[in-house]
Image: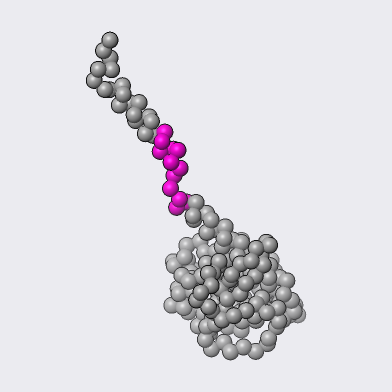
């Protein structure tokens, strides 16, 4: 894990968004270092570059761990425009953080229609404090057409890695679809048009009906 380096080409930029105290920094650091750190300085944005192996490919990721204003409209706008993929995080022990995800998504859509995103319910180890069921999380993800994961930044790396990897795959899939949609039509199709028009011109050329 390194702080942002300008010379590295980034394959995908990912931003974590969500209410305060849902564990965004813990999720980012767990993915980047495979370690759990309980206390963070969340007074400002932190952007990291990381090389990860996904589907046997070495990929360069740029990950934004936002400051405390990550749910305010101007901040959401800049994050949505910057990021290729968004990780929307709530805590399963905080129903308000879950309910705010819908509002957060509505702030994103005007700046990025059909955003590439995953929804992550963090703190799944605190089952005795659960306020949001896994079914509710899955239903919200289905409504917003996002993938859904529950994880515990304090207890495990695997589910967090799965969420990042799935988001990366979806980002690359969307990028490929955009490239195809913007690519010019095959020249062979244009050739057929020219041949067809040339045939019509020959039929109308003076002298073509003479014996």
- Viewer-proximal residue among 85 and 141: 85
Residue at the spot 45% in from the left edge and 52% down from the top edge: 182
Q: Which residues are magenta?
A: 181-192
Q: Main secondary structure of the magenta part?
A: helix
User: As displayed, is residue 147 above or below residue 189?
Assistant: below
Residue 141 located within the stretch drawn in magenta: no
Residue at the spot 65% in from the left edge and 89% down from the top edge: 39
User: As displayed, is residue 74 above or below residue 113?
Assistant: below
| Residue 93 picture location, percent across and down | 67, 79
Residue 173 shown left or right of residue 77 in the figure: right
Residue 69 shown left or right of residue 157 in the figure: left
| Residue 31 picture location, percent across and down | 66, 75
User: As displayed, is residue 196 above or below residue 34?
Assistant: above
Residue 172 shown left or right of residue 112 in the figure: right
Residue 155 visible from this viewpoint: yes
The quadrant holding residue 50 is bottom right
Residue 102 visible from this viewpoint: no
Residue at the spot 53% in from the left edge and 56% down from the top edge: 176
Instruction: Work out which quarter of the rendered image holds the N terminus and state it.
Output: bottom right
Residue 195 shown left or right of residue 28 in the figure: left
Residue 185 located within the stretch drawn in magenta: yes
| Residue 207 picture location, percent across and down | 25, 17
- Viewer-proximal residue among 156 and 209: 209
| Residue 98 picture location, percent across and down | 60, 74
């Amino acid at each position: 894990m390194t702080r942002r380096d300008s010379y590295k080409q980034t394959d995908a930029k990912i931003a974590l968004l969500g209410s305060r105290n849902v564990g965004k920094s813990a999720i980012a650091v767990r993915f980047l270092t495979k370690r759990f750190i309980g206390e963070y300085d969340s007074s400002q944005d932190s952007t990291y570059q990381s090389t990860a192996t996904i589907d046997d490919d070495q990929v360069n990721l740029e990950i934004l761990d936002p400051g405390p204003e990550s749910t305010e409209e101007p901040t959401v706008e800049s994050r949505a425009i910057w990021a290729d993929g968004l990780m929307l995080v709530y805590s399963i022990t905080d129903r308000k953080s879950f309910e705010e995800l819908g509002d957060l998504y509505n702030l994103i859509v005007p700046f990025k229609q059909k955003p590439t995103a995953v929804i992550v319910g963090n703190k799944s180890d605190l089952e005795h404090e659960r306020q949001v069921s896994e079914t509710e999380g899955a239903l919200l993800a289905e409504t917003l057409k996002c993938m859904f994961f529950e994880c515990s930044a304090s207890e495990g790396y695997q589910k967090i890695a799965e969420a990042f990897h799935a988001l990366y795959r979806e980002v690359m899939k969307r990028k490929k679809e955009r490239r195809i949609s913007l690519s010019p039509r095959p020249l062979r199709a244009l050739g057929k048009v020219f041949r067809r028009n040339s045939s019509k011109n020959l039929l109308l050329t003076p002298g073509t009906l003479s014996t």
